[in-house]
Amino acid sequence: MRAFLGIPISEEIKPKILEIQRKFSKFDIKFVEPENLHFNIKFFKEIKDEEVKKLKQILEEISEKFEPFEIVIKGLGVFPNKNYIRVIWLGVKDGYDIITSLAETIQDSIEVLGFLKEEKFIPHLTLGRVKTGRNKNELRILIEELEDIEIGKMKVDAIVLFKSKLTPKGPIYEEVFKVLL
């Protein structure tokens, strides 16, 4: 199955995130639907059923080493860079070190299952993917204006394995399992 590990977004901050997405509505961007908003920890192209069981075991062991923690969602960034904007995202301020440590611990631990470690983990919540370079300068200006935007606090208390089913209307995410911190 096509799947990824993610941290779900609390319902309380979703309206603020949607407000930010609306500021970009005049640009040619495919926005992440409210029900799909998350912090990505690890994307798996494909994961087998037997790997899912092993993955859950590993995450349960890791969860014993981490307490629930708070993050402040702050800062707007882009991938790969401001001259070639493909993805617009929100970052993490307070809690950055803990969420990064959690993600890196997970990635180090699942290498035994054959999953390659990401080069450098950057905690981010994808707002949308830019489809065309239309109005590129205007888009860059808006991004710079919102660079220091603060969305609010959120408690991180679980890691979820989501199954991702691609449809013509966009992906549909379904929870496979959740491990509490």
Image: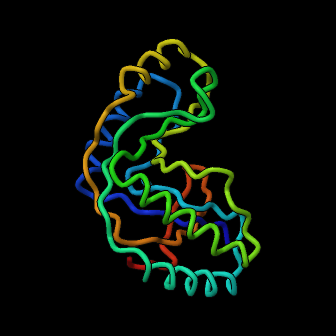
User: In the figure, 176 relative to 80: above or below?
Assistant: below
In the rendered view, tell whether residue 105 sits above or below residue 134. Answer: below
Return the residue nearer the eye: 114 or 136: 114
Furthest-right residue in this view: 114
| Residue located 29% across and 62% down the image | 155
The percent coordinates of residue 168 (x first, y second) are 61, 50
Q: How many marks?
A: 0
Left or right: 2 with respect to 178?
A: right
> Closest to the observer: 26 or 90?
90
x and y percent of residue 134 in the render? 58, 17
Could you say which quadrant of the image residue 74 lies in? top left
Residue at screen point 25% across, 52% down: 153
Residue at 43 percent of width and 83 percent of height: 64
Residue 111: x and y, percent?
71, 72
Please identify the residue farthest to the left as the structure is shown.
12
Q: Nearer the viewer, residue 103 or 56?
A: 103
In percent of width and height, residue 178 lies at: 44, 78
Q: Quadrant of the N terminus?
A: bottom right
- Which color scheme did the rendering employ for the protein? rainbow
Q: Residue at x 26, y 50 (%)?
A: 13
Left or right, 159 with respect to 117, comes to: left
59 relative to 93 in the view: left or right? right
| Quadrant showing the C terminus | bottom left
